[in-house]
Image (cartoon, coloured by chain):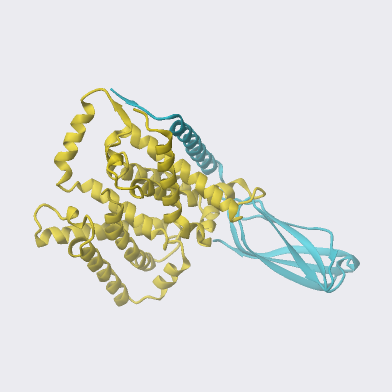
Chain colours: A cyan, B yellow
Amino acid sequence: MRKLKKNWMEWIVFSVSLLLVASTLTYLAYDGLTIGDAPPSIEIRTGAPLERPHNFIVPVTITNHGDLTAEGVHIEVVLENGGAEVERSEFDVAFLPRRATREGWVAFQTDPRTAQRIKARVLGYEKP
Amino acid sequence: MERPVRKSLQEYARGVAGGLLFSLPLIYTMEVWWAGFTSHPLRLLLYVVVTFTLLLGYNFFAGLRRDAGWAEVMIDSVEEMGLGLLIAATMLLLLRRVTFDMATSEIVGKIIIEAMPVAIGVSVGTAQLGGGDGESAADTGTGEDGGGSKKRHGEKAGTKDRVHFLGQAVIALCGAVLFAANVAPTEEVVQIAAEISPWNLLGLALLSIALGALILFYSDFTGAQRFAPTDEGVAAVIIGTIITYAIALVASATILWFFGRFDNVAPETIIAQTVVLGLAATLGASAGRLLLQAR
């Protein structure tokens, strides 16, 4: 019979490693078996406008509720007054992984607080 | 007898150095971070399993305690993978590629995808970065109170001169993966494959084969002669070279597939990409193998 002779430090490293490897495998297997294949589903929320020295900015939070990553997400934000467009702004997010949230700002020359409505929508995105 | 703690620390330090040395280019490559969250979890799982198999193979045939039996090889492989995960997580946190407000799948995906090459680097570093004091080679990591291990040493000595074909193949595969993985995730491979002409491609393939043969048989690389089969005939050279290139192509295709480079692509592009990356893989499988091999 051969017997393993390891010192306390090697046992600690081994135990931690075993725990890490086992939880990694378990997580991946669980995630892999429960994940769906729903295409990206993107929710956009706009926050309170802020005044900057040269313009006005509106914080935008976008969340992907789908099971797939969206690449090159193109977002448009429009200020409307009485149904008419006052000013339009847009921005891109390079990657929006599944269940992930990204934040950004859109800039306007018009004070968004004078607009009746801030309309945000996603225009399109690629499959990576 | 137990190894002193100081000696284990030394081994872990070599491992960490090796892990960073071989995988740092990948940690600093954005395509790799992206693959961490765009890959399907089951593909990542397969990637972890394949890497673990490679680690087992490398540790068994070329690792620090390769004479020590399967239990020790298994334990070492788990430790190397654990260290790989820890090193990758630390680096990604420091580089702010992973933050705690990210989705779990994104954090885990990025860490896993970076941790695997680190783990192979740890394994190679532990085995290769040590001083040649001869002490480590004799270290079996197990206590022996029977003749079982003696027998195994005997076998080992008997086969040492002959080429251990499977062992050579596994080490060549490790070398190919380690080198090709640094080039595979970049967009450049796709671009080259898209723009290359069939004649250029043939040229690349011939160059890869010639380099493989040159490094293995005609250059004076350390340990090169060990690969050369018993009779040094032309046939042996040709067989060795073809096997090396075959291993390189397999490694190249597997890595490219993993990074999603084969998804929705025409067969010609698949072949072109495999051959383009095959050059890097051949260098790894030939020169890399000789460097990774136990002294």
Q: Residue at x 49, y 52 (%)?
A: B114
Q: Is residue B42 above or below residue B249?
A: above
Q: Is residue B161 visible?
A: yes
Q: Quadrant of the N terminus of chain A?
A: top left
Give left or right: position of B191 versus B99. Answer: left
Q: Residue at x 44, y 45 (%)?
A: B13
Q: Is residue B88 above or below residue B195?
A: above
In front of the other: B32 or B65: B65
Residue A124, x across and y down, in percent: 64, 65
Q: Quadrant of the C terminus of chain A?
A: bottom right
Q: Is residue B109 visible?
A: no
Q: Is residue A83 above or below residue B257?
A: below
Residue B197, x across and y down, in percent: 34, 77
Give left or right: position of A86 versus B27. Answer: right
Give left or right: position of B158 versus A113. Answer: left
Q: Residue at x 84, y 63 (%)?
A: A49
Give left or right: position of B21 versus B133. Answer: right
Residue B202, x across and y down, in percent: 28, 72
Name the image quarter holding residue B183: bottom left
In front of the other: B145 or B77: B145
Q: Residue at x 17, y 48 (%)?
A: B163
Q: How many marks?
A: 0
